[in-house]
Amino acid sequence: MSVFLNKAKNYNMHSNINSSSAKLTESSWNKSPTNLGVRKTNRFSKNSSGFFTAEPTKSGGSRSNGETKNEITGVGVVVVEGGLVRILQENRVAMTKEEQSEFGAQPFMLPYKCYDAKGNEIDNETLANAIREQIQEDKRNGKLVFSTTDVQKLLKMEDDEIIKYAQNNAKRFKDYHFPMVVCRERLKIKKNKAGEFERMETPREGLIRLLDEEHRLHFRPTPEFVPTPEFVASLSQFEYQREGSKTKQVIYLVDSKGLIPICRAEQNYFCARSLPLPGLLNNDILETRREVYKTSGDIDNDIKIFEEMCAGRDIKRWGQTELWERCKKEFALEPPKLTRQTHNTNL
């Protein structure tokens, strides 16, 4: 059962927003053009354990061999509201080795009825053709870790068969979408009008984009408002470096009181695979869903349940357990400990 069926409790948990963690200024990070790689669904290869792992590509996201030690290459954020912490569900799913071999790095998934950005239902023929086109593109580009031999069998199927296949995948993996409390993003390359490298995205820009894409939130007062470097530098934050990694991420704590929701498209396509229907089915439009604020203790429990449920599944790129534990310490988000009280009673 999905951890997102649990309801948040409304009891208070104290958090120290003004953490004493080190602040990162706009000028103290590395602007190297070597921060390359991609988000969720780009190039993958199999590692020694048999699971798929991301390879560096041209557009930004997964690690490049050219990165330097202690370089800031990404950002993360924890959003809090009073004594509660925001947790949501990502469109990627945890898979076994066997499922990855059958479905590819991430499966095609469709809801029972699929709607575009304007709320109009998309017909089966259009959806089936888009899936066929994506498979053909994967074949042309040699991305067989996405469109495996089994997935390529869809090319010989009728429209309704393809739709049923993708709908069954959505049902099969509905409980294995990654729960995210610390959302993260790679810093991207900024290009000039000629499409050439100009500079790297700053952590401030990365944080704004991360809140927009993953949380559908923006700093007050309007979606057009751009917070100053000084404001972002004043946020509680720390630099996180995973054991064995050459690079670092800046993890921020943001209070929801300083944020406003962003109205998004009406589409309900929730899948890590983008389809070639421009403006209709982009996995970046609906990267997350089912956001809820919970106590730190409830989130601990959700993460534990998901880990146990995913025994034998590939969750190494999920990365929440260790990072969440660090965030609780850095941002004073530990759940309150219950102590037994004794009273003197005169009988």
Image (cartoon, rainbow, N blue to C red):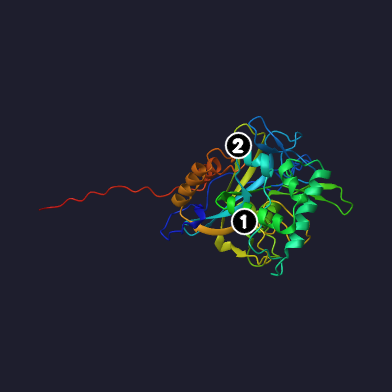
Along the line of sight, the residue nearer the viewer: 20 or 5: 5
User: Residue at 77% of width from left, 34% of height from top?
Assistant: 66
User: Residue at 68% of width from left, 32% of height from top?
Assistant: 47
Residue 73 can be seen in this image:
yes
Which disc number belongs to residue 89? Answer: none
**Percent position of residue 259, x then y:** 60, 62
Number of on-image labels: 2
Which three-letter amino acid code belongs to the residue tagged 2?
Arg
* Residue corresponding to mark 1: 288
- In the rendered image, the residue lying farthest to the left is 347
Q: Is residue 100 left or right of residue 311?
A: right
* Residue corresponding to mark 2: 242
Residue 231 can be seen in this image:
no
**Percent position of residue 321, x then y:** 53, 42
Q: Assess disc 2: are there few (<14), some (14-19) or many (≥20) residues with their C-alpha within 10 Å of its C-alpha.
A: few
Indicate the secondary structure of the residue bearing disc 1: strand
Give the mark nearer the N terminus: 1 vs 2: 2
Which three-letter amino acid code belongs to the residue tagged 1?
Thr
Judge whether 10 appears above or below 237 on screen.
below
Along the line of sight, the residue nearer the viewer: 49 or 222: 49
Q: Is residue 99 left or right of residue 330?
A: right
